[in-house]
Image (spheres, rainbow, N blue to C red):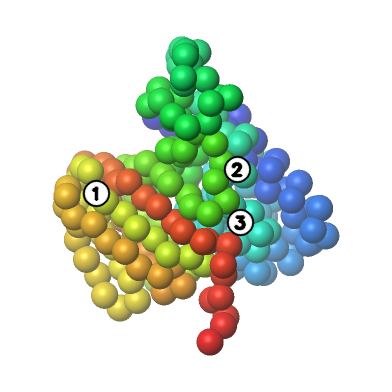
Amino acid sequence: MRPSPASWETLGRKLRTERERRGIALREMARRVGVSPSLISQMERGLVAPSVATLWSMTTELGLVMDELFSDAERPTNTPEPQGDASPQHGHVQRKGSRKCIRLAGGVEWERLTAQPDDEVEFLHVKYEAGAESCPENSLFRHGGKEYAYVLAGRLGVQIGFEQYELSPGDSVSFKSQFPHRLWAIGKEPAVAIWAVVNRTDDNRNGS
């Protein structure tokens, strides 16, 4: 399903608010992320959705964990109110029909698998539609933390440094996120995976 402009506006507003709170000029943010100022402006106004790579880069620069964006993200439409132990105040069980969702540019969708925000791990159900990719072939990205993924359906391409892999259902992968990497769907079917990113805010990309 195509993202609704309202969800893009919510995401952009959160990014803009945090950028302004930190006193980072729009042009400076664009320079740090490696995109044009006009693209940052369009994302913050909800006119376009960020790519996976751009969103990771922006949240890293702003010191945000992804769960802080999910807190304002949309819920799936036509979702019944949770009952019993599924209610938000219990905070342990996340029902399938009420997961928070972020839809990104190019046919990438993230759904949070935890009932409450978690500042230590980002635990996600990830879908790459046919033809979707996290970034262009010549523009790998990196960030803090370590990633773990298990493929549920479709075929997922993974590049880590100079190595490329094709993952099928039942395959899994783990790698340090500081290594330049790229993800994409292979073939005509969506690639679906369970994904976890641990300690992403421990960003030592420029360290030893």
Between marks 2 and 1, how big is the CA–CA gap? 24 Å
Residue 97 at x, y percent in the picture: 40, 22
Circle 2 is placed at which residue position? 69
Amino acid beneath label 3 = Thr
Under circle 2, the secondary element is helix
Q: Quadrant of the N terminus?
A: top left
Under circle 3, the secondary element is helix
Determine whether 26 is above or below 73 in the image.
Answer: below
Q: Confirm whether residue 49 shows in the render.
A: yes
Earlier along the polypeptide chain: callout 2 or callout 1? 2
Judge left or right: residue 105 versus residue 73. Answer: left
Earlier along the polypeptide chain: callout 2 or callout 3? 3
Residue 96 at x, y percent in the picture: 38, 26
Residue 188 at x, y percent in the picture: 20, 44
Between marks 2 and 3, how big is the CA–CA gap? 9 Å
Under circle 1, the secondary element is strand
Residue in the image at 68% along x and 48% along y: 15
Circle 1 is placed at which residue position? 151
Amino acid beneath label 1 = Val
Residue 6 at x, y percent in the picture: 60, 29
Judge left or right: residue 150 versus residue 29. Answer: left
Circle 3 is placed at which residue position? 59
Q: Quadrant of residue 40?
A: bottom right
Q: Which mark is residue 5?
A: none
Q: How many marks?
A: 3
Residue in the image at 58% along x and 24% along y: 89
Dot 3 surroundings within 10 Å: few (below 14), some, or many (20 or more)? many
